[in-house]
Amino acid sequence: MDSSASSRPETEHEGKPRIGKKLRLVIIAAVVIAGIAGAWWYYRYQTYGQYMQSTDNAYVAANSVVVSSKVAGYVDKVLVSENDRVTENTPLVQLDLRDYRAQAAQARAQITATLAGGDTIRSQITEQDAAIRQARAQLAAARAALDLANEQVNRYRPLAASGAEPREKLDQHVMQAQQARAELAAAQAAVAAASGRRSTLFQQIKQTQAQADAARAQLEAADLNVSSTMLKASIAGRIGDLSVRVGQFAQPGQRLMSIVPVDQIYVSANFKETQVGLVRPGQRAELEIDALPGIMIEGRVDSIAPGTGAEFSILPPENATGNFTKIVQRIPVRIAIEASPKIRRLLVPGMSVVATIDTRNAADELDAISSALE
């Protein structure tokens, strides 16, 4: 019994150093692994992580077009349905065009009447030219009669003075000369009146031409209104927010539907102002759509907004008044989506996105700026 009792403590003493040695090895290994991991994380952060700017304040967007009517009228036909895909110039809505057709017909009738009036005035000008020629002939006859009367007066005046001819004869020729002079004045006035009448007729022709031009402008406006009763798609896309109904009275500028260009979607990401110092157009981006978990979509920075979102709000902040609390502003960054059509057809405006931009290609710019300032 003494020999067994003496051997048991020796075994226990031999096991304790072994356990302590293993623990030390585990701790050392853990410290080494943690150091390597920390060094790797630091290296990864310095060379990659700090240049990855990410935000979840992003969404899929598109430059949608609101369809509204230019003219007022009752809706006669709705030619599309909700979510339909349309191409450019696809007919969408037909308004009642009878009133506008009547206006166009009235303008055409006005043009015809005005042109007919112009033709009538031109005929009157032809007649007036004949009247002018007649008046000038009468003027020439009156001038000849006056010359003859003056010659008679000059001839009989010496004869009457010598008593060879009676005084009454001279007085008769003087009276005839005065009458011829009056007829000459009347003929001259007739020529002037006929010429003035001709000028008036030409002015009336100009007036009819102006009236015809005004009627043509009215016709053009009426034809434009007729064509405006057919609403067509200005871009290709899909129909959304369709609110127009047959029989509805459409007012000018009233929202009837929207066209979403689903083939021209992009991502609008609102980064904090502290994140955009190295963001440049053309940089690569990764997009994770909430609706497509686990799928990373490639993107490219297209442009950066010229101001923060607050600057373009309806009521921009007035920091010069009242108490001031500094708030980190957000700057919209537009990111072009570079994905296959198979993925694009799954994306619609409004979807939430997590956007990450790789800014490594601009890493040296801040150092260059700092060096220039020193």
Image: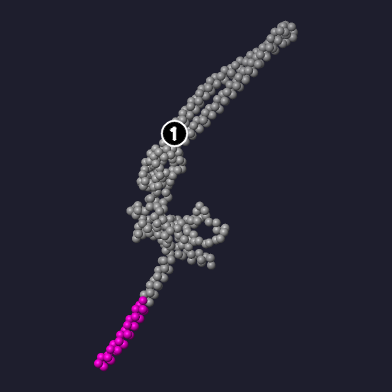
Color scheme of the displayed model? one colour
Does residue 179 appear anywhere in the picture? yes
In terms of depth relative to the viewer, which is nearer, 282 or 297?
Answer: 297
Q: Is residue 188 magenta?
A: no
Relative to 294, is 79 above or below? above
The residue located at (37%, 56%) in the rendering is 338
Q: How many marks?
A: 1
Is residue 17 part of the magenta span, yes or no? Answer: yes
Task: Tell me which residue sits at (40%, 52%) in the image.
Answer: 349
- Picture coordinates of residue 85, whole percent (x, y): 36, 46
- Label 1 Cα neighbours within 10 Å, binned few <14 / some 14-19 / many ≥20: few
Q: Is residue 276 left or right of residue 169?
A: left
Q: Quadrant of the N terminus?
A: bottom left
Residue 226 placement: quadrant: top left
Q: In front here: 158 or 186?
A: 186
User: What span is in magenta?
Assistant: 1-30
Q: Quadrant of residue 40?
A: bottom left
368, 240: nearer the viewer: 240
> What is the x, y in percent for residue 184?
64, 17
Seen from this angle, which residue lies furthest front? 1
Q: Main secondary structure of the magenta part?
A: helix
Does residue 44 appear left or right of residue 163 in this picture?
A: left
Residue appearing at x 51%, y 66% in the figure: 370
Residue 302 visible at all: no
Give x and y (percent) for residue 17: 33, 85
Residue type, label 1: Asp
Looking at the image, which is closer to me, 279 or 326? 326
Work out whether 79 lies above or below 47: above
**Residue that mark 1 sits on:** 99
